[in-house]
Image (cartoon, rainbow, N blue to C red):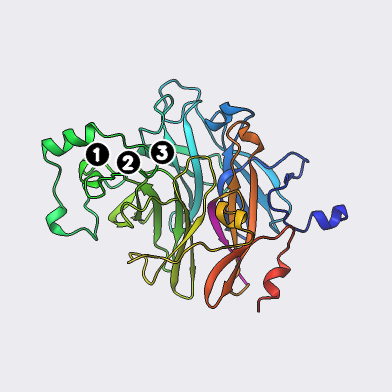
Amino acid sequence: MTTSAANHCFRPGQIWPDDRGVPINAHGGGVLLHDGVYYWFGEHKIAGEAGNRAEVGVHVYSSPNLYQWRDEGIALAVSDEAGSPIEHGCILERPKVIFNAPTGKFVMWFHLEPKGAGYSGSLSGVAVADRVIGPYEFVRAFRPNAGVWPANVPAAEQRELEPEKLALLATMELGGGPRAYYPKHLLFRRDFAGGQMARDMTLFVDEDGLAYHIYASEGNGTLHISQLSADFLSPAGKYVRVLPGRFNEAPAWFKVGGRYYMVTSDCTGWSPNPARLLAADTIWGPWEELGNPCLGSAQQVATTFQAQSTFVLPLPGRRDAFIFMADRWNPRDAIDGRYVWLPVEFRHGVPMIGWQEEWNLEFFDKMI
């Protein structure tokens, strides 16, 4: 394969250099198309296990064609200030950026855990910029939807927990993965006043301009879909719970023909697992599981190509053309995590993801 050919194709799982020949450093990220240019935002990792914490910030790259990427620097830098929510050594994951046309601002959301707190914070971080590549100014960190009940919860369950139930929860181990017993109707009530837990996340702007924050909540056991305010800087005060107790994380969202889809994963830490495809006719649900969307060998299907979903990128100007973006995590040497970009193809109207050793955007021309 010639150098020219290599620069005009995707090779999932292989080292992907930027314009300087340095491997792209944008993990757990997402892509924004603005004024005809693609911008890829992601976690900047450093070498070794230390790279699992945020020591630099959010990196951004630009591209006119999705194959070749120019390093645009650090869009959001972590802080040198002790006690800052985004202090060096915090956990800052899955940054996503959307553009708010009325305000002219670029808005970034991410999952944030303060330094030294493990995953106990379960916060959402928000930053804003006047230019797409930044610099982004950190606005605040918080748990979303404090004082708001889920729109799809019966009125009888819209009450805060009694002291004895709070005491019961305090005795339970509620880590981030499935367990024999999960109190799927208690955690959102426990967190009503202070706000809901928010971990793995993505953002979505619908055709009507309304934006949504989709995140793993309630100890990773339940997904939340939360509408954002008109300026995209805070929750609008309406959200729903999706598949309580099913344990979905790593949501990646897209819309086809008026139908909404999510690709998610199970909650198995850094280890890959089978992807899940969720679908709904309205953004608020009900949502149903459609099974594993991956096609390939048994090992590829069982591990989502040894990767985990992060984003689904729509390609304007091409009918039903989407790129599934995923990460191959390497927690022992975080900077060496690899990217798996694959085309979404539709079989009997259902989006599926098949393995490709090498491919380019002409793949979608063959689907027409």
Q: Would you name the residue on which mark 2 appears?
A: 143
Question: Image quadrant of residue 44?
Answer: top right
Q: Position of residue 293 (x, y in %)?
A: 53, 63
Q: Which residues are magenta?
A: 309-317
Q: Amino acid at mark 2?
A: Arg
Q: Quadrant of residue 229?
A: bottom left
Q: Which residue is mark 3?
A: 139
At a point 68% along the width and 57% down the height, the residue shown is 66
Mark 3 and mark 1 in contact (Cβ < 8 Å)?
no
- Quarter of the picture containing the N terminus is bottom right
Say whether residue 310 is magenta: yes
Residue 133 seen in the figure: no
User: Which SS type dominates the magenta stretch?
Assistant: strand
Residues at marks 3 and 2, CA–CA distance in whole angstroms: 14 Å
Q: In the rendered image, which quarter is residue 208 located in? A: bottom left
Amino acid type of the residue tagged 3 in the rendering: Val
Q: Are marks 2 and 1 in contact (CB under 8 Å)?
A: yes
Indicate the position of residue 212 as horizontal and vertical percent values: 39, 57
Decide which of tag 2 and tag 1 comes sooner along the chain.
2
Q: Which mark is residue 194?
A: 1
Picture residue at 62% right of the left edge, 30% below the top: 46
Q: Position of residue 219 (x, y in %)?
A: 34, 42
Could you say which is closer to the camera, residue 191 or residue 349? 349
Of all residues, the one furthest to the right in this rendering is 2
